[in-house]
Image: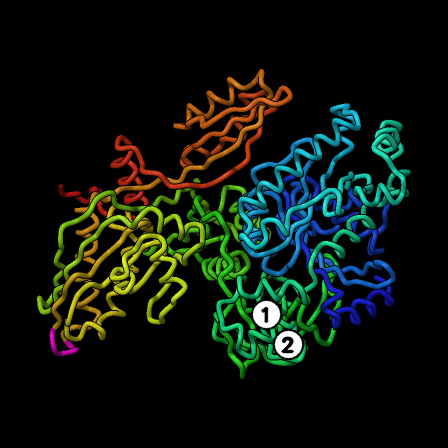
Amino acid sequence: MAEEMVEKIKKLMYKPDRIRNIGTIAHIDHGKTTFSDSLIAGAGMMSFEIAGQRRFLDTDDQEQERGITIWSANASMVHNFDGDDYLINLIDTPGHVDFGGDVTRALRAVDGAILLVDAVESVMPQTETVLRQALKERVRPILFINKVDRLIKELKLSPKQMQERFMRIITEVNALIQKYAEDEYKKKWMVNVSDGSVAFGSALVKWGTSLPYMEKTGITFSDIIEKTEQGKPEELAEKTPLHRVVLNMIIKHLPSPVQAQKYRITKIWSGDMKSEIGQSMEKVNVNGHLAGVVTKVTPDPHAGFIATARIFSGKVVKGTDVKMLGKRKTGRLQQVSIYKGPHRLQVDEVVAGNIVGLVGIPDAFSGETICDPDFAIQPFEQIKHMFEPVVTKALEPKNPRDLTKLINFLKKLSREDTTIAVKINQETGEYLVSGLGELHIDAKVERKLKEQGLDVRASPPIVVYRESITGKSPQIEGKSPNKHNRFYFIVEPLEKNIYEAMKEDEIPSTYDFKKKNLELTDKLKELGMSADEVKNLEFIYERNMLLNTSKGVQYLNEAMEMIKDGFKSIMDEGPLSREPCYGVKVTLVDASLHEDPVHRGPGQVLPAIRHGVTTGMLLAKACLLEPKQIIRIDVPTEAMGGAIREVQNRRGQVLGMDEERGMTIIRSKLPVAEMFGFNSELKSATGGKGFYSLIDVIYEKLPKSLRDKTILEIRKRKGLSQQVPKVES
């Protein structure tokens, strides 16, 4: 990057109204990284000749080898619009569903998103997922319809047919915005071909245009078809260069931090907006106290760990201390830098409204709040991905001396990617790594372990089940080992609409009612909970609830934290197979406690809680829930039979079918336990022409015929007794 460009970036960093923080989002293979190449080349950061083939932001060997983006990547560029320079901080994100956690984290850092849609494939399941996630973070979208040359060369569409195809895609995207955006933004954020918030083109051959640009330059659809058919895309790229059209569109239609932070902060931060720090973030005050969020942590062979952060207030300065609220630690910033793809340019400071790379806070994790050491703030909301880990592998080093290295690697990994869960199986000593899919674990865990020279044994993929209940228990007594403390519980299923509200993040899935939260209590009442029930709520934990309806029990307040700990331990490891519990409501109806604190310590209270709640769950007809994937299969109509057979052979269910231009789209539901190897078998059954995409992950009750067998398999793997816990009637 020329020295002049660096100086421009340094100056523009201090002008938040001239900054655009944006991300590219799309279904896999819809062309995001190739598209980013064109923008970067247009900004003078790489040669136009290699843009598209180079995949500048795919910096990892695996990404180049697999031809897909696995890690989000950053680049800063300068673009002149109407005589003024603007700083555009771009984040290129993955498209494969297994790496969706990287998309979610990147969206916390940006204010606007370019949604790419393949002109031939149209809106696909991951298109919906990433757009939904963007709207959830109050990130405004614009639309780029990519691979338009395929409509001309492959489908031979006329200008009128092309326009009809574009309008259908725009209508589908707007329908999703209507479906997922909050009421205030449903109309405001719809994309519109006439105002230029929609563009179309071909990122691979670097041309792009929009209706306003066509009107301005006189280019027509017929010209586009003619040049494409003649094999002269470079002439199109000269007349209507993609980078100019898109960068203009970004500046015109996507918000600056000054605009976006007015409405985004209330969504991602639950503190008092009238407070000093609340006002400072709303106004993007570069001289205020520091408030920022770490959105990515990456290892660097020279610098240790680099934390990518979005700064909402104040500034980060090289050589100063910052506090990590989640870790309750302070770190000194050794480097402060801005991004140029794989390279970082070091600067002395970066102010509010920017995305920055930081070295010196190695303990930070994705989602960590950073602030001034002497001015602690309310932490930012947790960054939560839409899907949960459903596939687990057990790892153990072949050489016992490598155990420490493995532990350190897994600790680092869970900080880098919060959608990877790491847990030790205390009975077997194995390290359990859970991810969003087989590819997720293969690319980010197993492959990286090999690169580190660690030789590990990995188990076949293990499915993560859930435990729940289907009925209501009678009142159950839990006695402490010394018989001096008694607790009485009723266990029943959590109301379905409340569970769904937690799943959709309308209410938190974990919340301790030590503090009153009027907004939350009002929402629960709105969902049908009585005022008395809401008043008696003690704890929400991982979509389970603990209530206390007891009256006048002496010393109960002193024991309440232990009761919550006992409740948590059972919800983490249910009675059937020690799998996590979902949708359980536990009510403490009465208790009697010994007057001497010595006789009501954790050693007495915790076993009583465990016994009472566990027995209650078994009496409330404990059941095992298995994860199922709702998928979309695209297959030529003549090969449809093979795809349907493959679904039915795996306990799958066909939910619906549509036909379009000789292709059949099959919506199906399959158990995750039956999905291993599905992709290769589908290719085999359809002559290599069928492929599938994930729409959603749900949990459903395991069939009775498989229940006991599955429970025993899980218990055996975990080193538990080979007996199904008895469910009494």
Q: Quadrant of residue 160?
A: top right
**Left or right placement of residue 666 versus residue 86 in this view:** left
**Left or right placement of residue 604 versus residue 238 in this view:** left
Q: Residues within 10 Å of mark 1 (few under 14, many from 20)?
A: many
| Residue 449 visible from this viewpoint | no
Percent coordinates x, y for residue 498 in the rendering: 35, 51
Q: Which residue is mark 1?
A: 292
Q: Which type of secondary structure does the marked residue at label 1 adopt?
A: strand
Q: Residue at x 70, y 72 (%)?
A: 350
Task: State yes or no: discs 1 and 2 in contact (Cβ < 8 Å).
Answer: yes
Q: Earlier in the sequence, mark 1 or mark 2?
A: 1
Please determine whether, in this image, residue 454 is positioned above or below residue 333.
Answer: above
Closer to the camera, 182 or 326? 182
Identify the amino acid type marked 2: Gly
Q: Quick one: quadrant of the N terminus?
A: bottom right
Q: Which region is colored magenta?
A: 594-598
Q: Residue at x 26, y 33 (%)?
A: 704
User: In the rendered picture of this protein, how many numbered marks are placed on residues?
Assistant: 2
In the rendered image, residue 595 lying in the magenta stretch gets the answer yes
Instruction: Tell me how far mark 1 sits from mark 2, CA to CA.
Output: 9 Å
Please determine whether, in this image, residue 275 is positioned above or below residue 529.
Answer: below
Q: What is the number of the mark on residue 314?
A: 2
| Residue 183 visible from this viewpoint | yes
In the rendered image, residue 452 lying in the magenta stretch gets the answer no
